[in-house]
Image (cartoon, helix red, strand yellow):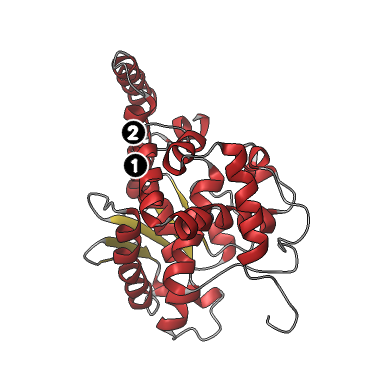
Amino acid sequence: MRTFLQMIPGGVPAVVGLVLAGLFVSMVPIHPQLWLYPLARQAVALKINYQTKDMLAQETPHFVIRYTESDADMVAMVAAAAEAAYEPVTATLKYAPKGKALILIYSDRQAMKTAFGWAGESNAMGFYWGGVIQILSPKAWLKNSQSVEEFITTGPLAHEYTHLVLDHLARGNYTRWFTEGLAQYVEYKVNNYEWVNADNRLAGKLYSMNELDGDFDGLSNQALAYRQSLAAVRYIAEVHGEAKLSQVLGYLKAGEKVNKAIEKSLGMDYVTYETMVHLWAKGNMKEYSKIAN
Ligand SMILES: [Zn+2]
Protein backbone atom coordinates (compact mmCIF):
# COMPACT_ATOMS: atom_id res chain seq x y z
CA MET A 1 0.00 0.00 0.00
CA ARG A 2 2.90 2.35 0.79
CA THR A 3 4.23 1.95 -2.74
CA PHE A 4 0.78 2.50 -4.18
CA LEU A 5 0.35 5.80 -2.34
CA GLN A 6 3.77 6.99 -3.47
CA MET A 7 2.80 6.32 -7.04
CA ILE A 8 -0.53 8.11 -6.96
CA PRO A 9 -0.66 11.04 -9.39
CA GLY A 10 -1.77 14.39 -8.06
CA GLY A 11 0.12 14.04 -4.78
CA VAL A 12 -1.58 15.18 -1.58
CA PRO A 13 -5.03 16.13 -3.01
CA ALA A 14 -5.32 12.70 -4.57
CA VAL A 15 -4.30 11.02 -1.33
CA VAL A 16 -6.85 13.11 0.59
CA GLY A 17 -9.43 12.08 -1.97
CA LEU A 18 -8.50 8.46 -1.50
CA VAL A 19 -8.66 8.79 2.28
CA LEU A 20 -12.14 10.30 1.96
CA ALA A 21 -13.04 7.46 -0.36
CA GLY A 22 -11.65 5.12 2.26
CA LEU A 23 -13.79 6.72 4.97
CA PHE A 24 -16.79 6.42 2.71
CA VAL A 25 -16.22 2.78 1.90
CA SER A 26 -15.45 1.99 5.55
CA MET A 27 -19.10 2.84 6.16
CA VAL A 28 -20.04 0.13 3.70
CA PRO A 29 -20.33 -2.93 5.91
CA ILE A 30 -18.94 -5.64 3.66
CA HIS A 31 -15.30 -5.90 2.56
CA PRO A 32 -14.29 -2.25 2.23
CA GLN A 33 -10.92 -3.21 0.70
CA LEU A 34 -12.79 -4.53 -2.34
CA TRP A 35 -14.03 -0.99 -2.98
CA LEU A 36 -10.84 0.90 -2.24
CA TYR A 37 -8.40 -1.37 -4.06
CA PRO A 38 -9.63 -0.69 -7.62
CA LEU A 39 -9.32 3.06 -6.94
CA ALA A 40 -5.69 2.68 -5.87
CA ARG A 41 -4.91 0.46 -8.87
CA GLN A 42 -6.58 2.90 -11.26
CA ALA A 43 -4.56 5.76 -9.78
CA VAL A 44 -1.31 3.90 -10.44
CA ALA A 45 -2.42 2.88 -13.93
CA LEU A 46 -3.33 6.51 -14.71
CA LYS A 47 0.07 7.70 -13.59
CA ILE A 48 1.89 5.10 -15.72
CA ASN A 49 -0.41 5.90 -18.62
CA TYR A 50 0.46 9.60 -18.31
CA GLN A 51 4.19 9.03 -17.97
CA THR A 52 4.33 6.84 -21.06
CA LYS A 53 2.02 8.95 -23.24
CA ASP A 54 4.86 10.06 -25.55
CA MET A 55 5.91 6.52 -26.44
CA LEU A 56 4.88 5.06 -29.79
CA ALA A 57 1.59 3.20 -29.54
CA GLN A 58 -0.47 0.58 -31.28
CA GLU A 59 -4.03 -0.38 -30.36
CA THR A 60 -5.60 -3.78 -30.80
CA PRO A 61 -9.20 -4.74 -29.90
CA HIS A 62 -8.29 -5.38 -26.23
CA PHE A 63 -4.86 -3.80 -25.66
CA VAL A 64 -2.84 -0.61 -26.04
CA ILE A 65 0.82 -1.42 -26.67
CA ARG A 66 3.48 1.23 -26.05
CA TYR A 67 7.03 0.84 -27.31
CA THR A 68 10.15 2.66 -28.44
CA GLU A 69 11.47 3.02 -31.98
CA SER A 70 13.89 0.10 -31.61
CA ASP A 71 10.94 -2.29 -31.08
CA ALA A 72 8.80 -1.05 -33.98
CA ASP A 73 9.37 -4.37 -35.76
CA MET A 74 8.27 -6.35 -32.65
CA VAL A 75 4.89 -4.71 -32.10
CA ALA A 76 2.90 -6.84 -34.52
CA MET A 77 4.18 -9.97 -32.78
CA VAL A 78 3.35 -8.63 -29.30
CA ALA A 79 -0.10 -7.59 -30.55
CA ALA A 80 -0.72 -11.07 -31.97
CA ALA A 81 0.35 -12.77 -28.72
CA ALA A 82 -1.74 -10.42 -26.57
CA GLU A 83 -4.85 -11.01 -28.65
CA ALA A 84 -4.12 -14.77 -28.69
CA ALA A 85 -4.10 -14.68 -24.86
CA TYR A 86 -7.33 -12.71 -24.55
CA GLU A 87 -9.88 -15.42 -25.28
CA PRO A 88 -8.36 -18.34 -23.30
CA VAL A 89 -7.61 -16.17 -20.26
CA THR A 90 -11.04 -14.51 -20.09
CA ALA A 91 -12.75 -17.85 -20.80
CA THR A 92 -10.84 -19.65 -18.03
CA LEU A 93 -11.46 -16.90 -15.49
CA LYS A 94 -14.97 -16.24 -16.87
CA TYR A 95 -14.29 -12.53 -16.59
CA ALA A 96 -13.31 -9.79 -19.00
CA PRO A 97 -11.98 -6.47 -17.68
CA LYS A 98 -13.49 -3.26 -18.99
CA GLY A 99 -11.39 -1.10 -21.32
CA LYS A 100 -8.07 -1.88 -22.97
CA ALA A 101 -5.12 -3.18 -21.00
CA LEU A 102 -1.84 -1.25 -21.29
CA ILE A 103 1.27 -3.19 -22.30
CA LEU A 104 4.70 -1.52 -22.12
CA ILE A 105 7.61 -3.00 -24.09
CA TYR A 106 11.10 -2.38 -22.73
CA SER A 107 13.97 -2.69 -25.16
CA ASP A 108 16.41 -4.35 -22.74
CA ARG A 109 16.73 -5.72 -19.22
CA GLN A 110 18.28 -2.55 -17.88
CA ALA A 111 15.31 -0.49 -19.07
CA MET A 112 12.91 -2.99 -17.49
CA LYS A 113 14.77 -2.93 -14.18
CA THR A 114 14.14 0.79 -13.88
CA ALA A 115 10.50 0.27 -14.86
CA PHE A 116 7.43 1.14 -12.82
CA GLY A 117 6.98 -1.16 -9.85
CA TRP A 118 9.73 -3.57 -10.94
CA ALA A 119 10.25 -6.25 -8.30
CA GLY A 120 10.90 -9.32 -10.40
CA GLU A 121 13.80 -11.65 -10.98
CA SER A 122 16.59 -10.43 -13.22
CA ASN A 123 15.76 -13.16 -15.73
CA ALA A 124 12.01 -12.43 -15.90
CA MET A 125 10.51 -11.62 -19.29
CA GLY A 126 7.71 -9.54 -17.89
CA PHE A 127 5.67 -8.59 -14.87
CA TYR A 128 2.29 -7.22 -13.93
CA TRP A 129 1.98 -4.28 -11.58
CA GLY A 130 -0.53 -1.54 -10.88
CA GLY A 131 -2.89 -2.57 -13.64
CA VAL A 132 -0.20 -2.54 -16.35
CA ILE A 133 1.63 -5.39 -18.14
CA GLN A 134 5.30 -4.64 -18.67
CA ILE A 135 7.42 -6.92 -20.85
CA LEU A 136 10.94 -7.28 -22.13
CA SER A 137 11.30 -6.92 -25.90
CA PRO A 138 11.27 -10.34 -27.58
CA LYS A 139 14.49 -9.18 -29.28
CA ALA A 140 16.27 -9.44 -25.94
CA TRP A 141 15.53 -13.13 -25.37
CA LEU A 142 13.62 -14.92 -28.13
CA LYS A 143 15.77 -17.47 -30.01
CA ASN A 144 14.01 -16.92 -33.31
CA SER A 145 13.01 -13.29 -32.96
CA GLN A 146 10.56 -13.49 -35.86
CA SER A 147 8.62 -16.55 -34.68
CA VAL A 148 5.17 -15.43 -33.58
CA GLU A 149 4.32 -19.01 -32.63
CA GLU A 150 7.36 -19.31 -30.36
CA PHE A 151 6.57 -15.95 -28.76
CA ILE A 152 2.94 -16.91 -28.12
CA THR A 153 3.82 -20.26 -26.52
CA THR A 154 6.95 -19.33 -24.55
CA GLY A 155 6.42 -15.59 -24.03
CA PRO A 156 4.96 -13.86 -20.98
CA LEU A 157 1.62 -12.55 -22.29
CA ALA A 158 -0.79 -15.34 -21.31
CA HIS A 159 0.83 -15.40 -17.86
CA GLU A 160 0.84 -11.64 -17.23
CA TYR A 161 -2.62 -11.13 -18.68
CA THR A 162 -3.96 -13.78 -16.27
CA HIS A 163 -2.49 -11.75 -13.38
CA LEU A 164 -4.27 -8.67 -14.73
CA VAL A 165 -7.67 -10.33 -15.18
CA LEU A 166 -7.54 -11.95 -11.73
CA ASP A 167 -6.60 -8.59 -10.22
CA HIS A 168 -9.66 -6.97 -11.80
CA LEU A 169 -11.95 -9.87 -10.91
CA ALA A 170 -10.87 -10.29 -7.28
CA ARG A 171 -9.94 -6.64 -6.66
CA GLY A 172 -6.69 -7.50 -4.95
CA ASN A 173 -8.23 -10.24 -2.82
CA TYR A 174 -5.82 -13.11 -3.47
CA THR A 175 -2.45 -14.43 -2.33
CA ARG A 176 0.83 -14.35 -4.26
CA TRP A 177 0.91 -18.13 -4.69
CA PHE A 178 -2.66 -18.19 -5.97
CA THR A 179 -2.08 -15.64 -8.75
CA GLU A 180 1.20 -17.31 -9.74
CA GLY A 181 -0.50 -20.71 -9.75
CA LEU A 182 -3.40 -19.47 -11.84
CA ALA A 183 -1.13 -17.67 -14.34
CA GLN A 184 0.95 -20.83 -14.79
CA TYR A 185 -2.19 -22.96 -15.04
CA VAL A 186 -3.40 -20.89 -18.02
CA GLU A 187 0.06 -21.10 -19.65
CA TYR A 188 0.05 -24.85 -19.08
CA LYS A 189 -3.46 -25.34 -20.41
CA VAL A 190 -3.23 -23.03 -23.39
CA ASN A 191 0.42 -23.24 -24.42
CA ASN A 192 1.49 -26.49 -22.77
CA TYR A 193 4.26 -24.50 -21.09
CA GLU A 194 5.66 -25.45 -17.67
CA TRP A 195 8.60 -24.05 -15.73
CA VAL A 196 10.44 -27.26 -14.83
CA ASN A 197 14.07 -27.30 -13.71
CA ALA A 198 16.52 -29.16 -11.49
CA ASP A 199 15.59 -26.97 -8.51
CA ASN A 200 11.85 -27.53 -8.51
CA ARG A 201 11.52 -31.31 -8.34
CA LEU A 202 8.45 -32.28 -6.36
CA ALA A 203 9.88 -35.56 -5.10
CA GLY A 204 11.67 -33.99 -2.11
CA LYS A 205 10.55 -31.81 0.77
CA LEU A 206 7.86 -29.33 -0.16
CA TYR A 207 6.79 -25.98 1.23
CA SER A 208 3.70 -26.03 3.43
CA MET A 209 0.65 -23.99 2.40
CA ASN A 210 1.43 -21.88 5.43
CA GLU A 211 4.83 -21.01 3.95
CA LEU A 212 3.32 -20.26 0.53
CA ASP A 213 0.64 -18.11 2.18
CA GLY A 214 3.29 -16.17 4.11
CA ASP A 215 6.26 -14.39 2.54
CA PHE A 216 6.01 -16.03 -0.88
CA ASP A 217 8.64 -13.81 -2.51
CA GLY A 218 11.00 -14.38 0.39
CA LEU A 219 11.06 -18.20 0.02
CA SER A 220 14.59 -19.26 -0.88
CA ASN A 221 13.62 -21.74 -3.61
CA GLN A 222 11.45 -19.61 -5.90
CA ALA A 223 11.37 -22.27 -8.62
CA LEU A 224 9.82 -24.73 -6.16
CA ALA A 225 7.40 -22.12 -4.75
CA TYR A 226 6.17 -21.42 -8.29
CA ARG A 227 5.98 -25.13 -9.16
CA GLN A 228 3.91 -25.86 -6.04
CA SER A 229 1.64 -22.92 -6.83
CA LEU A 230 0.86 -24.49 -10.20
CA ALA A 231 0.29 -27.85 -8.48
CA ALA A 232 -2.18 -26.29 -6.02
CA VAL A 233 -4.26 -24.78 -8.84
CA ARG A 234 -3.98 -27.77 -11.19
CA TYR A 235 -5.15 -30.03 -8.37
CA ILE A 236 -8.37 -28.01 -8.07
CA ALA A 237 -9.01 -27.82 -11.83
CA GLU A 238 -7.96 -31.34 -12.81
CA VAL A 239 -9.10 -33.45 -9.84
CA HIS A 240 -12.21 -31.53 -8.80
CA GLY A 241 -12.98 -29.92 -12.17
CA GLU A 242 -12.65 -26.46 -13.66
CA ALA A 243 -16.13 -25.58 -12.35
CA LYS A 244 -14.64 -25.76 -8.84
CA LEU A 245 -11.87 -23.39 -9.87
CA SER A 246 -14.56 -21.01 -11.10
CA GLN A 247 -16.27 -21.38 -7.73
CA VAL A 248 -13.03 -20.45 -5.94
CA LEU A 249 -12.77 -17.34 -8.14
CA GLY A 250 -16.40 -16.52 -7.34
CA TYR A 251 -15.67 -16.65 -3.60
CA LEU A 252 -12.59 -14.44 -4.03
CA LYS A 253 -14.72 -11.96 -5.93
CA ALA A 254 -17.17 -11.98 -3.02
CA GLY A 255 -14.36 -11.23 -0.56
CA GLU A 256 -13.53 -14.65 0.93
CA LYS A 257 -9.87 -15.32 1.66
CA VAL A 258 -8.13 -17.86 -0.59
CA ASN A 259 -8.05 -20.63 2.04
CA LYS A 260 -11.76 -20.22 2.84
CA ALA A 261 -12.65 -20.00 -0.85
CA ILE A 262 -10.89 -23.34 -1.43
CA GLU A 263 -12.40 -24.98 1.65
CA LYS A 264 -15.92 -23.95 0.66
CA SER A 265 -15.53 -24.91 -3.00
CA LEU A 266 -13.91 -28.31 -2.46
CA GLY A 267 -15.72 -29.18 0.76
CA MET A 268 -12.44 -30.03 2.51
CA ASP A 269 -10.39 -28.27 5.14
CA TYR A 270 -7.19 -26.48 4.19
CA VAL A 271 -4.93 -29.05 5.91
CA THR A 272 -6.50 -31.89 3.92
CA TYR A 273 -6.19 -29.79 0.76
CA GLU A 274 -2.46 -29.36 1.43
CA THR A 275 -1.99 -33.11 1.92
CA MET A 276 -3.94 -33.93 -1.24
CA VAL A 277 -2.07 -31.34 -3.35
CA HIS A 278 1.31 -32.72 -2.23
CA LEU A 279 0.28 -36.31 -2.94
CA TRP A 280 -1.23 -35.44 -6.30
CA ALA A 281 1.73 -33.30 -7.36
CA LYS A 282 4.26 -36.02 -6.54
CA GLY A 283 2.25 -38.61 -8.47
CA ASN A 284 1.08 -36.62 -11.46
CA MET A 285 3.31 -33.70 -12.35
CA LYS A 286 6.23 -33.77 -14.73
CA GLU A 287 9.68 -33.86 -13.11
CA TYR A 288 12.91 -32.46 -14.43
CA SER A 289 15.20 -34.97 -16.10
CA LYS A 290 18.43 -34.37 -17.98
CA ILE A 291 17.20 -36.43 -20.91
CA ALA A 292 13.85 -34.70 -21.28
CA ASN A 293 15.21 -31.18 -20.90
ZN1 LIG B 1 3.67 -14.28 -12.49
Left or right of 7: which side holds 208? Answer: right
Residue 199, visible in the rendered structure: yes
Residue 156, visible in the rendered structure: no
User: Marks 1 and 2: in contact by CB < 8 Å?
Assistant: yes
Where does residue 12 sit, x and y in percent of width and height? 38, 22
Number of numbered discs on residues = 2
Instruction: State the residue at coordinates (29%, 65%).
Output: 87
- Residue type, mark 2 in image: Ala
Where does residue 78 sit, x and y in percent of width and height? 38, 72
Q: Quadrant of residue 19?
A: top left
**Label 1: which residue?**
250
The label number, if any, that marks residue 254 in the structure image: 2
Left or right of 16: which side holds 221? Answer: right
Which of 232/192 is in front? 232
- Residue type, mark 1 in image: Gly
The label number, if any, that marks residue 84 in the structure image: none
- Please, is residue 69 above or below residue 263 in the view? below
Q: Say few, some or many: other residues with alpha carbon within 10 Å of mark 2 (under 14 / 14 to 19 / 20 or more).
A: some
Q: Spatial distance from mark 2 to mark 1, Cα to Cα?
A: 6 Å
